[in-house]
Amino acid sequence: MKKILTSIAACGLAMLSLAPDAQAQTSDRKTNISVYYNWLQYHGDLGSEWFKSNKVEYGLGVTVSRYIAPGLDIGLDLSYGDMKFSADYPKNTYYPIRRFDANVVNVGIPIKLKLNNGWALKEDAFIAPYLVVQPGVFFASPDLYDINDKIVGNSDVYAFDISAAAGIKFNFSETVGLFVQTGQHYPLTDQIDGITNVGKLNDRYLQHKLGLSFNLGKAKDTDGDGVSDRKDKCPDTPSGVAVDENGCPLDGDKDGVPDYQDQCPTEAGTAAMMGCPDKDGDGVADKDDECPDQAGLPALRGCPDADGDGVADKNDKCPDTPAAPR
């Protein structure tokens, strides 16, 4: 059984090859693959090694999860580890089992409740705390040793299992995160350590995880500007137009007219003037206005005509001559 379990763990590591195409796991990019190293710590009829740094057993695991809703992921988890414990009995004490060494496999369905759900924290927040409840099945193959360190039993143990955990994920980029997690497994059996107390389920263990998280998928980007629709505040930007981090067209002079439509992209203007200024407010943009400091007439390229004779004042040799009667 040990060879089979080791092969299963190796298959989990092979899934790392999927990581290069990863993107952030959000409502756009919904699939995540995580691989981790785990530490197991036993607690049961023989004693406890919980939170003792010198008593940990090691293993590997892989999780594939799917984004369901903001703050909720559901997945499939497979982990393998070695769990063992040696009781500290006095030499003159008789007990049928002194220690055990077990290969442990868990297959579970993790239900992850994330605080980066859009209202407590942003979905793409750097620090992402979460809680996990995971029903599943437990497999173990314990070797049982007596006080003389002789094998007195070996059997395969199968049981339903429930675990609860808390963790924190650090999103270093849109493609890779690192997470740490600690939780307790409660297999519905009392046969892991070879000592059975009728009516009691004393065997349980902690599982500490340290791993990398890779997110898969492609964000929906309707206008093809490189900013996903979920983050794009201007989702209908024409193709080829340069945009900012919010997906909106660049507006260098901050006049509300995007550069690609702005006929004066370096001078703040008005939308009515296609982004160009009109200092004298005569409806003729300064770039076309031959008299930019005097309100004039569009027909005279923005110059005034005081006597109304159709000749701009700047060219009128008789500026006070009234227009000819009709």
Image: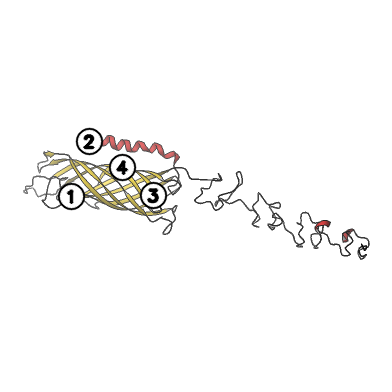
- The residue pinned by badge 3 equals 68
> Residue, x 8% and y 45% (percent of image)?
96
Q: Nearer the viewer, residue 87 or 306?
A: 306
Q: CA distance from mark 3 to mark 1?
A: 33 Å
- Viewer-side label of 3, 2: 3
Give the label on residue 61, or none. Answer: 4
- The residue pinned by badge 2 equals 2
- The residue pinned by badge 1 equals 203
Q: CA distance from mark 4 to mark 1?
A: 21 Å
Q: Quadrant of the N terminus?
A: top left
Q: Are marks 4 and 1 in contact (CB under 8 Å)?
A: no
- Residue 53 visible in the snapshot: no
Q: Amino acid at mark 4?
A: Gly
Image coordinates for residue 174, horizontal then vertical, percent: 46, 47
Dot 3, crowdedness within 10 Å: few (<14), some or many (≥20)?
some
Residue at disc 4, secondary structure: strand
Q: CA distance from mark 1 to mark 2?
A: 21 Å
Q: CA distance from mark 3 to mark 2?
A: 35 Å
Q: Are marks 4 and 2 in contact (CB under 8 Å)?
A: no
Q: Are marks 3 and 2 in contact (CB under 8 Å)?
A: no
Q: Amino acid at mark 2?
A: Lys
Q: Amino acid at mark 3?
A: Ile
- Viewer-side label of 3, 1: 3
- Residue 113 visible in the snapshot: yes
The reply, left or right, for residue 54 in relation to residue 252 is left
Q: Earlier in the sequence, mark 1 or mark 2?
A: 2
Residue at disc 3, secondary structure: strand
Residue at disc 1, secondary structure: loop
Q: CA distance from mark 4 to mark 3?
A: 22 Å
- Viewer-side label of 4, 3: 3
The reply, left or right, for residue 204 in relation to residue 231 is left
